[in-house]
Amino acid sequence: MSGLLSVAGLTVHTDAGRTIVRGLDLTLGHGETIGIVGESGSGKSLSMRALAGLLPSGLVAGGTVAIDGKDRTPGQRRALLGDRITMMFQDPFTMLNPLMRVGAQVAEGLATPSRSAVAERLAEVGIPDAAVARRYPFELSGGLRQRVGLAAALAGDPDILIADEPSTALDVTTQAEILTLLRRAGADRGMGLILITHDLRLAFSICDRVLVLYAGGLVEVAPTSALRARPRHPYTQGLLLSEPPIDRRLSHLHTIPGGVPEPDDVAGRCSFADRCDWAADACRAAEPPLVMAAPGHGSACIRQNEIAKDMATRRDAHSAADIAGEADAPSADVLVRIEGLAKSFGATRVLVDIDLDVPRGTCVGLVGESGSGKTTLARCLVGLETADAGAIEIDGVPAPDPARASGADIAAFRRNVQFVFQDPYATLNPRHTIRRCLTEILRANAVPKPHVDRMHALMDQVGLPVTYLDRRPSQLSGGERQRVAIARALALSPRVLICDEPVSALDVSVQAQILNLLTRLVREDGLSCLFVTHDLSVVRQIADHICVLQEGRIVEAGPTERVMRDPQHDYTRSLLASVPGAVV
Amino acid sequence: MRRMSPLLWIAALCVAIILICAAFGETVAPQSPDTQRLLVGDTRPSAEFLAGTDNLGRDVLSRTIVGARTAILGPTVIALGAFAIATLLGLVAGYFGGRIDGAIMRTVDVILALPGPLIAIVVVGVTGGGYWTAVGVLTLLFVAPDTRIVRSAVLAQRSQPYIEACRIQNIPRHRILFVHILPNVLPLILSYVVLDFAFALVNLAGLSFLGLGVEPGTADWGRMLFENRQILFTNPASVLLPAATIVVTAGAINMLGDHFRERTAP
């Protein structure tokens, strides 16, 4: 494979000297697709921006980048942008100029723009309808916008395309299409494709080689098949095992304890040592170099040979055993009953005649893509939205009508149903400590004193040390904030917890911790839960029953195992088929 | 955190000097500001009168120093008063929405549609004027745009999950408004208070210039511009010094306000 791009010792620092990327080596050949995989804070996006000469101000890049065997300075790399190198970003909406017709945006990159050339480029990304060229970005769906973005990126016939989470903002069904397109565009043109993603499974589905980044450094690089079957770095293995599998349900998900550190905090030693089960004194003595164990397969673990066997045993144990039993037959004891619920925003019907039951002590998964109405349904349950028609009943008590019911009735109803929000960063008041937040709730609801014992019990229930009570949200990681949010929701001892995408904003390793916590609350503490998500592999791990929502209607409902194994509705089948790495 | 540039330090120094003048004007001033020297008349700057004298022989520098008081006091009252009222209105309009919001915001729209300075001139003129009348009228006029700013900030907070969580958890409304929303919009509000101050300073000086602000004879920058315009060519400093202090004070405070707003922005 001819060397199109080769990078040596790429670093990114802030002006103040804080390290973000510690030194990255990579090569990319014509027609090759590589994946840069890492959690938030791994430096994956910034290192690739440095590569393209596109660092935001305040950041400085170091190291050498050679394109076609010639060293290029950051300024020279930026000059190659649009021509030799192109970037494609996560948000398909901000990537396109909202005031320009999409045809014009594709034409900008073409050497000889013409209407037919634009139509040809759009057809190439799966938009056969030439009329789309005359539309504005806001007239297109997210998937179509991302296709136009790809067409615009490819218009200059670049040699290197850097795609930064190109499918993360899209629904699963569209996600798969965009990835296929990317892969094909790379192969057809002999273009080098760099895919930046947080999702190992997604990288496996289209990449030839995968580079795993952790705390600003490269910990493992390997061909896809080798990395999937025999990871040689404990972090990679941890990530792989933390991924909730789509094909079965585990009674307990593998987790990596703790969170991703700052690169400077782990300088001069193995960055993963504090979270690693195999860490020895030697790991903390020096920064381990990337050692090639097999052709093309390197790992920055000094004990990789000693522990290889151990790691394999653990992988086998993980894939063999531990499959959770089928849920019991749905109990007749219904806790939450929803009948004929309907809701419209203006002329748009968001929910149409929804019937849904949550049996006591179970978790019901509500699955749907964006726009399916799943969040609106969840918000109706806690009174953040008011339904137009239909009835909601919790434990035999009908939801009070906000216009007519007394404040005391509404308050009493709300104590029984609590909510966990998606965004861990906006879910807590940034100015209040956890103690203040919990005290306020207990006081407002006249929970008898002493509150301290209750708060300690809550922290214990969500697995946080009681010393965290005096922290502010800014001192907590995303996963810890979500634990606090769960503790807050549990403070009033609700009968049912409504979770709206509680893990979708979290990193994979942290996601598993929260899922285990919620599973434990349902299994052991007898909590009932309505879990709203777009992610089928997540719902498989946690829900006893699944309801699939499409355009405001429930198209399929049933026990999780049955629905996943034997989907009856076409829509459920297409959802299942589009999960990256799914066996269809 | 952004570091302060040298220019910002100079601005802060200017504001500090003006504040000292406003507080201890008579003590700091080299001469008594109101002593008339009719025999001296208007003179150019000299060793005794560093900025010369006006046509009644009063020391221009001392009058400018003492004039800082009306220049600081009125705008402070206007900026703080307008924002106290606007914060209350904006919180209520933004959080409760519906009819209350409609009533408040349509009134605001009407006030904004009126030509502000003209209204001030008419009202102050008809009621016979006076410094505090001018301050009162300007305060009311400033409430309108400020209410809009507060309301939009409240709207942005209102839909945040942490506020929705409060609602679900039966936190009383007054606590949501004053314990959760207000502290989170306060930094933004305070930075606008500073900007309001600068506008109010210029507006008040304008009214004084038109003879509608302070009483004749008071040492006030706007009034000095009005009184000394006839001697512009005999003692230019008598006009240029108060004019420069208005510009410098408004500019310096504006710069500081901008700086603080940027620092509080996410």
Image (cartoon, grey):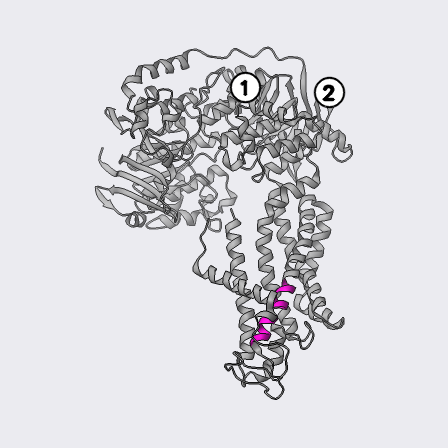
Most foreground residue, A189 or A203:
A203
Q: What residue is pinned by disc 2?
A: A396
Is residue B191 visible to the viewer in this orientation of the structure?
Answer: yes
Residue that appears at 68% across and 77% down: B216
Q: Chain of mark 2?
A: A
**Quadrant location of the N terminus of chain A?**
top left
* x then y, percent, for residue A260: 42, 31
Is residue A349 visible to the viewer in this orientation of the structure?
Answer: no
Label 1 packing within 10 angstroms: few (<14), some (14-19), many (20+): many
Label 2, label 1: how far apart the Cα atoms are: 25 Å
Q: Which residues are magenta?
A: B61-75
Mark toward the start of the polypeptide (2 vs 1): 2
Q: Amino acid at mark 1?
A: Thr
* x then y, percent, for residue B194: 58, 58
Residue that appears at 52% across and 44% down: A139
**Which numbered disc, 2 or 1, marks the residue closer to the eye?**
1
Q: Which mark is residue A468?
A: none
Q: What residue is pinned by disc 1?
A: A519
Q: Amino acid at mark 2?
A: Gly
**Extreme-bottom residue of the structure:** B39
**Quadrant location of the C terminus of chain A?**
top left
Q: Chain of mark 1?
A: A
User: Which SS class for mark 2?
Assistant: loop
* x then y, percent, for residue B174: 70, 41
In the image, are marks 2 and 1 on the same chain? yes
